[in-house]
Image (spheres, coloured by chain):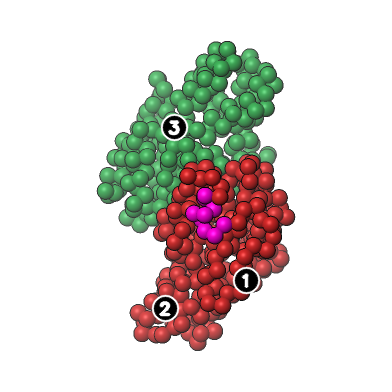
Chain colours: A red, B green
Amino acid sequence: MDQVKALVFDVFGTVVDWRTSVAREVAAFFAKRDMTVDGEAFAKAWRKRYQPGMEEVRSGRRPFTRLDVLHRENLELVLADFGIEPASVGDEGLDTLNRAWHRLDPWPDTVAGLTRLKTKFFIAPLSNGNIALLANMAKHSKLPWDAILGAEVARAYKPQPEAYLRTAEVLALRPDQVALIAAHNGDLAAARLAGLKTGFVARSAEHGAGQTKDLSAEQDWDVVATSFTDLATKLGCA
Amino acid sequence: MDQVKALVFDVFGTVVDWRTSVAREVAAFFAKRDMTVDGEAFAKAWRKRYQPGMEEVRSGRRPFTRLDVLHRENLELVLADFGIEPASVGDEGLDTLNRAWHRLDPWPDTVAGLTRLKTKFFIAPLSNGNIALLANMAKHSKLPWDAILGAEVARAYKPQPEAYLRTAEVLALRPDQVALIAAHNGDLAAARLAGLKTGFVARSAEHGAGQTKDLSAEQDWDVVATSFTDLATKLGCA
């Protein structure tokens, strides 16, 4: 990790807790309308449609489409699955629900860790989220990014190599001067194949009780930490 | 300006003082090599090649090329004009000089003004500078941007309408929900034609003694201020 100048971060699950944030917003949204919706089940069902939505873009069947648009399309499908007619929610309501992804809360160690890491490294998200989503989230959760990078800047969704390589290029760095920090072994494997350095931070609460995936490092990642503050210590940030 | 949610800023001249920053770096760089170079004349000569370099891209004669690359090409031309063989400076030296544009100092009111404006608006650069340049500058000068936008995100150089329109699109806002803040009447005129709101902040020291251009507002811009702190007051930011 000695040559690394920039740390780029997976966001959903690694930086923020999407599951409980979306669950809370969804439950509250419908409670105001005197409806009872299982927020956690809804959040998980919404997230389950995340990869198939992006796969349409990765495969080339669809031109690059930002995540806000994919989230919104998936929202209407999930509402139908929950027996709720999307039209009954109204356009403004759908937009409010969709923007729950702009207001995700960080894990308790996130802001303290990023603030320390920022003293030594250039820090930015390398997320499949679009720029407005990530920037609004940063404003909401006080994430001290140096820039907002990711799929919309690279015009490619992870784990396609272009997502990693174009991010290094935008930073005018070689791939091995950039490290991806993620809670997902698959994301790190793709980053390593593209030539980036890799750091694993376990987020065993991401999927709630009974999580079976990504509980530990599955390769010899360049750094492995238990939290962002532990990562800061391991990377020599005061 | 009531519907405006995001303020986007011209950077070179409006947010930062490129002239004295580059002049100081250039003079110091050559002084270390026991050479005397007129830093201010060099900075102005370098800046003079800025528009012709971008015009190659705007005209379609050249694919989108980020400003760091154009700056570097222009640097070699300016060195030759000053009787300095670029090869004698060395690759590392050329890179150090080129990155003077990443280390521009803000005007005295910039950071205080942006910090107040950020409490009410989404704030981002809409500059022809590339992402790494703008993000390194933000880190150097503590500019509290919510995101780094501009030509490299829009893949178009101002004053082309795409530079303004794609920036609004990335923010998921209508053009009239975005205001460009600039010290240059021409930039504001192009932004207004694209449907953005406009704010003028005079920077009468940008070009040094004898500046004749952009000393005052030449159209009825939506807001006119004498500094970023005055702008914050006029836009109701505590």
* Residue A230 belongs to magenta span: yes
Assess whether mark 1 and mark 3 are in contact (beta carbons under 8 angstroms): no
**Chain under numbered label 2:** A
The image shows residue B16, relative to residue B42, as above or below, that is: below
Q: Quadrant of residue A63?
A: bottom right
Q: Nearer the viewer, residue B214 or A221?
A: A221
Q: Main secondary structure of the magenta part?
A: helix
Q: Judge whether residue A71 can be spotted in this image.
A: no
Chain ID, mark 3: B
How far apart are the two marked residues, 3 and 2, measured between alpha carbons? Answer: 48 Å
- Would residue B233 be found to the left or right of residue B47 on screen? left
Residue wearing tag 1:
A213
Mark 3 and mark 2 on one chain: no
Numbered range of the magenta stretch: A225-233
Q: Is residue A168 above or below residue A52?
A: above
Observer-nearest of A26 and B225: A26
Furthest toward the bottom, the residue is: A83
Q: Is residue B104 magenta?
A: no
Tell me the SS state at disc 2. Answer: helix
Residue type at numbered disc 3: Asp
Measuring 54% from the left and 30% from the top, which residue is drawn there?
B100
Q: CA distance from mark 2 to mark 1?
A: 26 Å
What residue type is disc 1 on?
Lys
Secondary structure category for the residue under label 3:
loop
Q: Give residue B105's mark.
A: 3
Mark 2 — residue? A27
Q: Give the mark nearest the N terminus, 2 or 1.
A: 2
Q: Residue at x 52, y 49 (%)?
A: A233
Q: Identify which amino acid the numbered label 2 is placed on.
A: Ala
Q: Where does the image place residue A26, in percent across and percent down from the top left?
A: 44, 76
Residue under the point 65% across and 28% down? B92
Q: Check disc 1: other Cα within 10 Å, few if <14, some if 14-19, many if 20+.
A: few
